[in-house]
Image: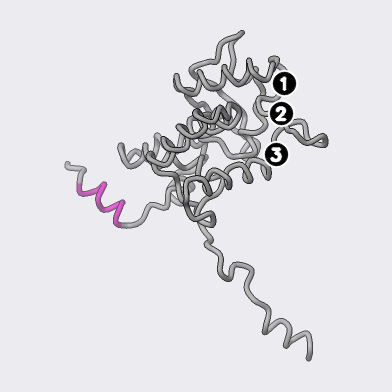
Amino acid sequence: MESAVAIAHREPWNKGKIVGQKAPFKPKDIWALRARLQMERRIRELALLNLGIDSKLRGCDLVALKVRDICHGDQVATRAIVMQHKTRRPVQFEITAASRDALLTWIKHAGLKPDNFLFPSRLHDSPHLGTRQYARILGHWVNELGLERADYGTHSIRRTKATLIYKRTKNLRVVQLLLGHSKIESTVRYLGIEVDDALEISEQTEI
C-alpha cells in the first residue's frame, strides 16, 4: 500500500525542465562569444567553439578528434572526414579560414603532435576532453552570453550551422548529409521542422 502511495506521489523526472531539442545559437550570440574568447586569449575555447560550429559533430565525436584528423602535415585542412561513433558512418565537414587559424594557434600553443588528441583533458583519468567537461564549458558560454542555461546544450553547437543552412536553402538533403543522418526523418525531427515549414517550402515550389 505504501509503495503504491509513493508511486502515485512520485514527481516526473522532467518536472520544471525543458525537454526536447536544445535551441541553436543565433549568429549574433556566436559573434559575441568569439569576440570575448579572442579578447581574453582563451585559445582552446575559441578553437573548440569554431570547430564545433563548422563540423556539426556530436559532442562525443568532437572531443575525440585527433590532430591528424584535421591536419595535413603542419596545416589545418579545409575539409575533413571522420567516422561517427553513434552511427559508424563517415561524415565530412568543412573547416573555415577563421577556424583553421584558431585551430593552428591552439595546436602550436599546446605543442600538439599528429597522434595527440586535439583537445586533451586536464583531468588525469581522461586522455581527452570529456563530453561532461565540454558541456560545462558550454554552460559557461551560455552564462556569459546571458542566455537561459536550460535552453542550451552541446547539441546547440551541432544544430547552429545546420539550422542556419536549412533556413537559407530549405534543402533537407543537404542538411542530412552534413549532419550524417541515415534517414531524412531524423533530420526533420532534429531541426524541429513543423507543418508550416513544409507548407512554406511547398508554396515556393512551382510545377
> Badge 2 is on which residue?
120
**Residue type, numbered disc 2:** Pro
> Badge 1 is on which residue?
116
Among numbered discs 2 and 3, the one appearing first in the sequence: 2
> Badge 3 is on which residue?
130
73 lies above or below 155: above
Looking at the rendering, in which quadrant would you find the N terminus?
A: bottom right
Res 161 visible: no
Residue at 47% from the left image edge and 52% from the top image edge: 147
Q: Nearer the viewer, residue 129 or 187?
A: 129
Q: Tag 3: Cα neighbours inside 10 Å, few (<14), some, or many (≥20)? A: many
Res 111 visible: yes
Q: Nearer the viewer, residue 17 or 145?
A: 145
**Residue type, numbered disc 1:** Asn
Q: Where is residue 22 in the image (x, y as percent from the top left)?
A: 50, 52
**Residue type, numbered disc 3:** Gly
| Span highlighted in magenta in the image | 196-203
Name the chief secondary structure element in magenta.
helix
Q: Tag 2: Cα neighbours inside 10 Å, few (<14), some, or many (≥20)? A: some
